[in-house]
């Protein structure tokens, strides 16, 4: 008998049967997966969604705004003002001698009459050595002669140009031969002329070298200011990797859910595994079955998800291009990153299957064969560790500056350290929530005694199987927490919804005097972060102003019957002596270094102007002196004291901070009472015209013409990319993940309760009893999850935004109510509905 | 049908008179087998003749005469209890009697008796089954064997049922107070738990 | 002659203290190659425990288990698994086959688990199916097989290759009498070809197929039966070991 084993020496070397055995086990696992994948469809769908979202977002991050918009393929640029028509040739020759290949881009700006804007006339060779990526022709061709021009869509719109038409501006005249764009910055508007514009005001040299070499170059014409730009490191990889890091955390969350789901799978297969063990499979073989199932789920999700994500990206490119503002090569997908995300999904899924695999492989064979569920294992988890992890996680989240990421003040994923902190924080929070969930469930047991029997039974089961229900609860809390965070974040951003200079139904008309050029924004709307803010008022007589007032009335009537006009009056201290350049308006300033920087002009508050910030002037706290969108400690700089003939700085004390509005609208106001109390005067500097419908380009052209005649400057909405669709997409994705986790968990609970339901039915429980049981289970879990999620998010946000709790003030009650009450109710209702059916196969033992 | 052995069994408890034996026989068999007094005395006389019982007082003839079992009587009884019934399958009645009788006999392990019969029955069944196994194509044989096997199976099931019933109610049989526990009684004690 | 399976003073106790249950109490049993032995007893007598201990699925509390003369009670889990792959085949009342594997794959599974290449293992599996008359169902999944066919496949799996110790727990319990008889006939046939069989049952008809019937009661072996009696003139004595 024993002699027949002599030929097995090869196999003897492997106690576990070696590769052939593993292959047989994996084959079986794969067949099981093929037969039963529908039962795992929820976890499959969830993983697929995560992989798809990862593939999509990491591809999007990889295609971040390219530096190519400015640099083309060069490494540095030098920009300086030209000394004259001949300087260009000399400077270019010197640069070519120094650098070798140089791409020369000339610029000339031509004011649009009656507007704060001007047109940039760009002279550039489309075949230049480096600048190629900054130019693309969309229609027609590039200009070849001095009298030819190609314009961008924006210019073509504004001047109603088409190919073959004539473009006349600032005394020049060109034939339009094509429509062009900067693929790296679709919002850039310019008119392209052939290289060598002799009237060019400034020039940019694109070169490829190092910074020392650039600094070593001496420009023959010796211009005053030379702006040197160095291409930054390619951040596309970095930001894509950052997305991947965040995805890892998301995958961990999904891994939790997957674990819970694999526990059910493993238990369903318990008898089959017992059978396999009876045949002689080792513990490793048994583990392999469940782990291979996990890997199969991961593989399936990875392939589908990666294909779905990349496909969605390619389909979405035409839609996101306008929003992002640059052309995207749809096929520029970082395949290795997508592959990495897919691989991570396989790893996560496999790892998620590991624990259930181990647990089920360790069940004694006789118990496994009996098909009885093993005794629930008691949970011993440290409360201290949970609190520690939560605290650490929240600290990491705070340090990672999520507020900066959310409001856009921080470069998205620009700082790898922040990303690491955020990732680590999220990781620790996930673990902390996971550890604290069983505690929350145990707390339930305290109230269980007073519930009706079905609910009591549901709660008892949750408490009994707290290792599993804890995982489910953690997943629900996190999923709901994510959507709460998205909602809170979105609502915090919502009151700052006004993006851009003015809305498309608004026109700002500014006064100017003859000394001020057309084509540039008047000083008082310049970005104060730029140097050169100074509050000089145009030298206009009251008669001039009256005339302008009348012109405005005509303009408004021409636009729209119901156009509303709001006057923009600046506060002015009459005691302030007039300077050489004219009188000065009142400003607010902020401390900067040793002195103060002016940051805003102070307008006289009117109900109409404040309405644009959502503030009712009548309801403003009495005694308030200044209302402003600016934050921090503010002063009135340079208040003239006639008695000492000195200027002094006065701290503004009675300030009310108001929500921000469009950037060019007045943002700082003094109340009429304060104006009077201080003995200051008001001076008209402009008007805000608000029309019933968006201003068309034709209307705008007409208004500009009229304004130019009246010596006024018109400011209309500048083309501005809107991130609104992106934000909506992000919210939808967050909700999608949250909802799928919830649906999946309720499904799991249903599966969990199936055996109990059978017993209950057999003992004569009515369908309403079954319904109550399932509904109570789902509802209780969802309620606990929502409570933990909302509380957690608010705690984290409050800690993170401790400097600015006001940002949380518009509490999105409706959304929170939907999550806090609606989700549990919906879960309970869904549980109630699905549990009504008689449990199938009361007596039948499924053949497995 | 063995009234002889039944009476012997009743006498193992203590000496009894004829009338008493009749009453106890009838109550012990659930009045399934009525017995007239003449039958009792005829049987007792034969037993006395064979030396299996003895009477204390040979002079008294009548209902007051006390009978006692001899050691030869005990041997005969034990032997009979363990002897499989003559015919196969055994008439159930005979097994039933044997069981009921065994319950009255101190020192007899009822379960052991049941097992003895079970062994015999299973052994017979094996013989039949093996016949069937050896002749797979013989339908007629299979039918005959099946009939026997099912009959045997019925008896074995009755034995099993009796076994568990006696386990559940170990004191079902009438047993006078003070009866001795058999030296092999630990199993019985266990069985009664 | 070495016993294919030997139990020496095997005891098994579940639980401890007040909940202590003695499933087996000092059981001695030797089953010799080619023998078909039935363990018979009422439910709760410990017969299933005896089978799981004999098949190395459980370890005895006390005593020794020898398979082919090799002591298995002290072996590691992996060694015992290997012993099951190479020597011990199980047949259960129901739930015998792995869904997801075809009949021939099920039959060949122990060999594959032991490292035999799939092709060779399935060749041997097919041969085992042929022996049991279900070779034409080789490519079917368990769902498509009748109860009798499933049980035949599981017997094929139990004896595939060199496996020669077949342990069966109520193997005909889920079958009707015709199929049950067929299965027992096959089991008996396998034993006549050298396989050692141990069947536990509460059913006398099933047990009567065995060469020897061992009676188990309260964890003790109390008796055993061999073919006996006088079945009648027309019946010749069977072959007893």
Image: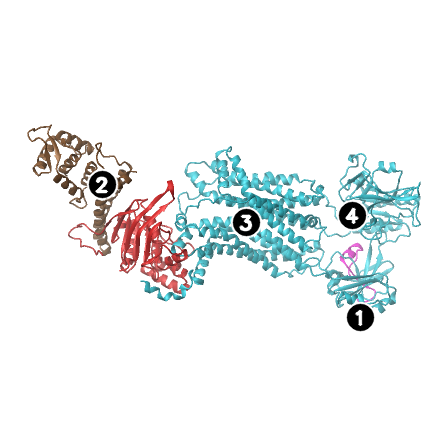
Q: What colour is chain B? A: brown
**Image quadrant where residue C21 sits:** top left
Element class at badge 3: helix
Report the residue marked by disc 2: B183
Query: Most extreme residue toward the left, as rendered?
Result: B59
Residues under numbered marks 4 and 3 in contact, where contact means CB atoms less than 8 Å apart: no
Image spot of residue B22 (x, y percent): 15, 31
Chain designation of label 2:
B
Question: In the image, which residues are magenta?
Answer: A144-164
Q: Which residue is mark 4?
A: A663
Which residue lies at the image location 86% right of the left edge and 38% below the top edge?
Answer: A675
Q: Which residue is denoted by mark 1 in the rendering?
A: A98
User: Is C79 above or below relative to A550?
Assistant: below
Distance from Cα at disc 1 to Cα at disc 2: 122 Å
Identify the element where label 1 is drawn: helix
User: Mark 3 sits on what residue?
Assistant: A256
């Amino acid at each position: 008998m024993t002699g027949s084993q002599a030929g097995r020496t090869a196999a003897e070397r492997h106690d576990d049967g070696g590769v052939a055995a593993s292959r047989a086990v994996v084959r079986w696992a794969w067949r099981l997966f093929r037969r039963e994948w529908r039962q795992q469809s929820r976890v499959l769908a969830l993983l697929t969604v995560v992989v798809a979202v990862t593939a999509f977002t990491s591809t999007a991050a990889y295609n971040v705004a390219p530096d190519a918009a400015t640099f083309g393929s060069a490494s540095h640029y030098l920009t300086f003002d030209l000394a004259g028509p001949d300087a260009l040739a000399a400077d270019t020759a010197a640069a070519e001698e120094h650098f070798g290949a140089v791409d020369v881009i000339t610029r000339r700006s031509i004011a649009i009459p009656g507007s704060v804007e001007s047109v940039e006339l760009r002279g550039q060779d489309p075949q230049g050595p480096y600048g190629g990526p900054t130019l693309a022709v969309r229609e027609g061709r590039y200009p070849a002669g001095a009298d030819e021009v190609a314009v961008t869509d924006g210019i073509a719109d504004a001047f109603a140009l088409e190919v073959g038409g004539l473009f006349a501006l600032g005394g020049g005249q060109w034939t339009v031969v094509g429509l062009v764009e900067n693929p790296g910055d679709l919002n850039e508007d310019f008119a392209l002329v052939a290289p060598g514009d002799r009237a060019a005001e400034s020039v940019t040299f694109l070169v490829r070298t190092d910074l020392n070499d650039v600094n070593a170059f001496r420009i023959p014409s010796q211009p005053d200011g030379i702006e040197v730009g160095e291409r930054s490191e390619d951040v596309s990889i970095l930001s894509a990797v950052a997305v991947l890091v965040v995805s890892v955390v998301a995958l961990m969350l999904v891994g939790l859910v997957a674990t819970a789901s694999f526990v059910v799978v493993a238990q369903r297969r318990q008898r089959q595994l017992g059978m396999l063990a009876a045949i002689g499979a080792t513990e490793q073989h048994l583990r392999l079955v469940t782990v291979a199932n996990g890997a199969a789920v991961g593989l399936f999700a990875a392939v589908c998800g990666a294909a779905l994500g990349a496909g969605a990206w390619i389909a979405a490119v035409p839609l996101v291009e306008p929003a992002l503002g640059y052309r995207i090569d749809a096929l520029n997908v970082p395949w290795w990153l997508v592959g990495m995300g897919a691989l991570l999904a396989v790893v996560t899924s496999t790892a998620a299957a590991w624990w259930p695999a181990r647990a089920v492989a360790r069940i004694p064979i006789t118990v496994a064969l009996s098909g009885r569920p093993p005794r629930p294992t008691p949970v011993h988890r440290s409360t201290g560790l949970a609190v520690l992890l939560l605290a650490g996680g929240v600290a990491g989240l705070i340090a990672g500056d999520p507020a900066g990421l959310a409001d856009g003040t921080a470069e998205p994923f620009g700082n790898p350290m922040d990303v690491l902190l955020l990732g680590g924080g999220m990781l620790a929070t996930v673990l902390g929530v996971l550890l604290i969930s069983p505690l929350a469930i145990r707390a339930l047991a305290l109230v269980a005694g007073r519930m009706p029997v079905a609910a009591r039974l549901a709660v008892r089961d949750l408490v009994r199987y707290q290792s599993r229900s804890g995982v489910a609860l953690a997943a629900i809390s996190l999923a709901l927490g994510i959507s709460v965070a998205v909602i809170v974040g979105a609502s915090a951003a919502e009151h700052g919804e006004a993006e851009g200079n003015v809305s498309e139904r608004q026109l700002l008309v500014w006064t100017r005097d003859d000394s001020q050029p057309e084509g540039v924004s008047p000083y008082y709307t310049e970005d104060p972060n730029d140097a050169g803010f100074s509050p000089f008022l145009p030298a206009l007589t009251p008669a001039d102003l009256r005339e302008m007032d009348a012109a405005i009335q005509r303009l408004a009537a021409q636009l729209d019957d119901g156009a509303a006009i709001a006057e923009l009056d600046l506060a002015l201290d009459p005691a302030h002596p007039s300077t050489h350049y004219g009188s000065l308006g009142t400003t607010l300033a902020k401390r900067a270094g040793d002195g103060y920087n002016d940051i805003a002009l102070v307008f006289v508050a009117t109900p109409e102007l404040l309405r644009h910030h959502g503030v009712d002037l009548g309801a403003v706290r009495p005694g308030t002196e200044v209302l402003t969108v600016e934050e921090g400690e503010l002063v009135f700089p340079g208040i003239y004291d006639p008695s000492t003939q000195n200027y002094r700085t006065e701290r503004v004390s009675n300030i009310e901070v108001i929500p921000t509005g469009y950037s060019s609208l007045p943002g700082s106001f003094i109340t009429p009472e304060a104006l009077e109390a201080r003995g200051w005067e008001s001076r008209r500097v402009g008007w805000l015209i608000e029309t019933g419908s968006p201003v068309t380009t034709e209307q705008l052209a007409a208004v500009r013409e009229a304004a130019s005649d009246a010596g006024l400057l018109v400011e209309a909405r500048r083309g501005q990319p809107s991130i609104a669709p992106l934000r909506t997409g992000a919210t939808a994705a967050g909700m999608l993940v949250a909802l799928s986790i919830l649906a999946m968990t309720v499904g799991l609970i249903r599966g969990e309760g199936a055996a109990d339901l059978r017993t209950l039915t057999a003992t004569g429980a009515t369908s309403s009893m079954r319904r109550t049981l399932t509904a109570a289970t789902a509802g209780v879990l969802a309620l606990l999850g929502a409570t933990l999620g909302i509380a957690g998010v608010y705690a984290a946000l409050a800690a993170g935004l401790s400097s600015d709790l006001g940002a949380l003030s518009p509490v999105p009650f409706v959304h929170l109510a939907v999550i806090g009450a609606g989700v549990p109710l919906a879960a309970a209702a869904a549980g109630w509905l699905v549990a009504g059916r008689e449990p199938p196969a009361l007596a039948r033992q499924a053949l497995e | 049908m063995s009234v002889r052995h039944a009476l012997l069994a009743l006498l193992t408890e203590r000496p009894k008179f004829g009338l008493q034996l009749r009453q106890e026989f009838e109550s012990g068999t659930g009045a399934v087998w009525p017995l007239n007094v003449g039958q009792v005395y005829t049987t007792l006389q034969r037993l006395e003749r064979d030396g299996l019982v003895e009477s204390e007082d040979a002079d008294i003839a009548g209902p007051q005469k006390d009978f006692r079992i001899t050691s030869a009587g005990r041997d005969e009884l034990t032997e009979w209890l363990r002897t499989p019934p003559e015919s196969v399958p055994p008439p159930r009645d005979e097994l039933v009697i044997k069981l009921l009788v065994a319950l009255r006999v101190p020192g007899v392990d009822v379960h052991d008796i049941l097992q003895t019969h079970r062994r015999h029955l299973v052994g017979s069944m094996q013989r039949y089954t093996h016949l069937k196994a050896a002749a797979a194509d013989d339908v007629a044989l299979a039918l005959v064997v099946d009939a026997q096997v099912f009959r045997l199976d019925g008896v074995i099931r009755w034995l099993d049922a009796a076994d568990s019933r006696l386990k559940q109610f170990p004191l079902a049989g009438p047993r006078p107070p003070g009866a001795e526990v058999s030296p092999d009684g630990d199993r019985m004690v266990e069985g009664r738990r | 002659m070495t016993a294919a399976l030997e139990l020496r003073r095997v005891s098994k106790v579940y639980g401890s203290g007040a909940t202590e249950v003695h499933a087996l109490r000092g059981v001695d049993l030797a089953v010799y190659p080619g023998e078909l032995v039935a363990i018979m007893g009422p439910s709760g007598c410990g017969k299933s425990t005896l089978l799981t201990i004999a098949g190395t699925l459980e370890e005895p509390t006390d005593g020794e288990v020898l398979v082919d003369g090799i002591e298995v009670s002290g072996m590691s889990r992996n060694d015992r698994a290997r012993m099951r792959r190479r020597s011990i085949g199980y047949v259960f009342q129901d739930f015998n086959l792995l869904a997801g594997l075809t009949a021939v794959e099920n039959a060949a599974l122990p060999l594959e688990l032991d490292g035999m290449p799939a092709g060779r293992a399935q060749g041997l599996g097919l041969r085992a199916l042929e022996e049991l008359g279900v070779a034409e169902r080789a490519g079917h999944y368990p769902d498509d097989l009748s109860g009798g066919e499933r049980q035949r496949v599981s017997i094929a799996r139990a004896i595939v290759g060199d496996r020669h110790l077949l342990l069966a727990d109520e193997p005909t319990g889920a079958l009707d009498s015709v199929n049950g008889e067929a299965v027992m006939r096959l089991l008996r046939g396998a034993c006549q070809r050298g396989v050692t069989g141990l069947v536990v049952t509460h059913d006398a008809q099933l047990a009567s197929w065995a060469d020897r019937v061992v009676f188990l009661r309260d964890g003790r072996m109390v008796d055993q039966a061999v073919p006996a009696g006088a079945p009648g003139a027309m019946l010749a004595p069977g072959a007893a070991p």
